[in-house]
Image (cartoon, rainbow, N blue to C red):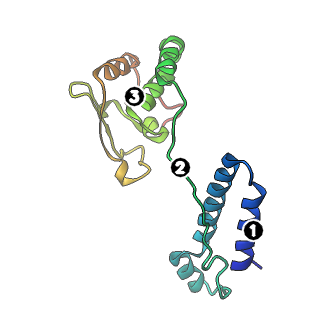
Amino acid sequence: RITPERVDDWLHKFKKANGGDPLREQKAARSAHSYLVNARALFSRRMLELYTKRGLQLPDPLPFEGVKANGNFGSTRYHSIVNAAELLRAGKTDLAEADPDAYAALLLALGAGLRRGEIDGLQWQQVFQDRNIIRVQTTAQKRLKTVESEGDVFVDAGLIAELARTRRPGSTLFVVEPNTEP
């Protein structure tokens, strides 16, 4: 029941329903584009090959064939409104002693830009205090999100020193202690 014409009609109605306010129009255009791209992925070359192998009968034309989400989407780059310095000061005050693991996670996220999964899998052997480097890499216990995620992150010496203060005697090989064994 989904045809290119119906998709075009939906796009037009969706944008029109959110018209009048420039901010709502921009959000609607971005959302419509996102919905279209994600739905169109169901009919990617790889998926079409899979459907053909499985004997699935597909409509002609395909539901999103020729449909374009025209519009000015604006920049979709993230612009933080978080005051990182204030957050770090509050984290040091509230977490450094009470919850060293949470404080270490905050340091790694704010100071090194690590993702949650990278923080969860980071081991002390990957922290090179003498060179101010944190090496992000796949380990026996944790796989990275992508191969491109591997590499060295150069950080401030103060961050490395502060991170080292979160290490407790008897801790495991992980910078942030896991709740369970890997």
Separation (CA) of disc 1 from disc 2: 23 Å
Q: Amino acid at mark 3?
A: Gly
Tell me what residue is drawn at x 36 percent, y 44 percent.
Answer: 139
Mark sitting earlier along the chain (3/1): 1
- The quadrant in which residue 64 appears is bottom right
**Pointer 3 local density, CA inside 10 Å: few below 14, some 14–19, many at least 20:** some
Badge 2: few (under 14), some or many (20 or more) residues near its Cα, within 10 Å?
few
Looking at the image, residue 95 sits to the left or right of residue 126; the answer is right
Q: Position of residue 13 (x, y in %)?
A: 77, 64
Q: Nearer the viewer, residue 68 or 112?
A: 68
- Residue 25 in picture, x, y percent from top left: 68, 53
Q: Position of residue 177 (x, y in %)?
A: 47, 28
Answer with left or right where residue 158 lies relative to residue 91: left
Q: Check if mark 1's residue and mark 2's residue have beta carbons within 8 Å.
A: no
- Provide the residue designation for mark 3: 111
Q: Tell whether 18 sits left or right of 160.
A: right
Q: Amino acid at mark 1?
A: Trp
Three-letter amino acid code of the residue under disc 2: Thr
Q: Mark 1 sits on what residue?
A: 10
Q: Which residue is mark 2?
A: 76
Q: Is residue 2 above or below residue 22?
A: below
